Image (tube, grey):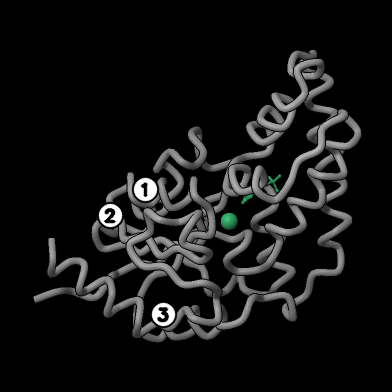
Amino acid sequence: MAQQPKAFIFDLDGVITDTAEFHFLAWKQLAEEVGVIFDRKFNEQLKGVGRMDSLERILQLNPERAVMPLAEKERLAAQKNANYLELIAKTTPADILPGIEELLRTAQESGVKIALGSASKNAAFVLEKLELTHYFDYIVDAATVKNGKPHPETFTTAADALGVAYSDCVGIEDADAGVTAIKSAGMFAVGVGDAQHLPHADYRVDSTDELEFTDIIRRYEEHQAAD
Ligand code: BG6
Ligand code: MG
């Protein structure tokens, strides 16, 4: 008989709150400074990707700036983070995306363990601002792992800390790189976003308000039974 999953591992930016938009705006502001214009389509490949890797990808768009001293890259990355921190300064629990707190509550009440699997160095700070920290049994952020998404380490580290087998975990992501990381970890991937960007998700919804605990469990069980 199919078993209920034992852990949910949530991405933060773009799943729990709409900080994905603030990362985009903060990078866009920075990119103009280095003579690069990039659009939302390009931004899709930055989602889930760490700060320095994102900067490298942006710099590649301008051959004249692709090579620069490390100190200058660090200055640009710090500038982007300053832009970002300004944009999230007013974040409150009102910025939790629809359906998320109910999903966290239902999962917790059902005995499912909950972890965060984020590529952001600001993850713990953002969770605090949203007043959601108490739902999480474990937090993986950029400082916890060596290999960022799409490498599975973010998700496997969370599962190991929770003591749950990878096949008993559900990962929830809005990014192409994030869904790839979940799948590479051998977990069930729930994608939030359009089919064009997340064709590899095991179960996909368009937006967080469609994330229902019972639907996720049913899809997970169907997937296990088909294996
Ligand atoms: C990820 C975001 O969660 O964190 C990326 O999807 C972001 O857009 C990355 O670049 C790193 O975030 P931070 O806060 O450490 O710069
Ligand atoms: Mg995300």
Placement of the C terminus among the 4 image quadrants? bottom left
187 relative to 122 in the view: left or right: left
At 36% across and 48% down in the image, what residue appears? 156
The amino acid at mark 3 is: Ala
At 20% across and 73% down in the image, what residue appears? 222
Q: Percent x, y for residue 96? A: 67, 76
In the rendered view, tell whether residue 158 sits above or below residue 71. below
Q: How many other residues sit within 10 Å of disc 2, few (<14), some (14-19) or many (≥20)?
A: many
The amino acid at mark 2 is: Tyr
Cβ atoms at labels 3 and 1 below 8 Å apart: no
The CA distance from mark 3 to mark 2 is 17 Å
The amino acid at mark 1 is: Thr
- Where does label 2 land, which residue? 166
Q: Percent x, y for residue 142? A: 59, 43
In the rendered view, tell whether residue 4 sits above or below residue 51. below
Cβ atoms at labels 3 and 2 below 8 Å apart: no
Cβ atoms at labels 2 and 1 below 8 Å apart: yes
Numbered mark located on residue 109 in the image = none
Q: Percent x, y for residue 137? A: 47, 66
- Where does label 3 land, which residue? 107
Secondary element under disc 3, as helix, strand or loop, is helix
In the rendered view, tell whether residue 141 sits above or below residue 11. above
Would you identify the image quadrant in which residue 12 lies? bottom right
57 relative to 115 in the view: left or right: right
Placement of the N terminus among the 4 image quadrants? bottom left
- Where does label 1 land, which residue? 156
Q: How many other residues sit within 10 Å of disc 3, few (<14), some (14-19) or many (≥20)?
A: some
Q: Percent x, y for residue 38? A: 76, 40
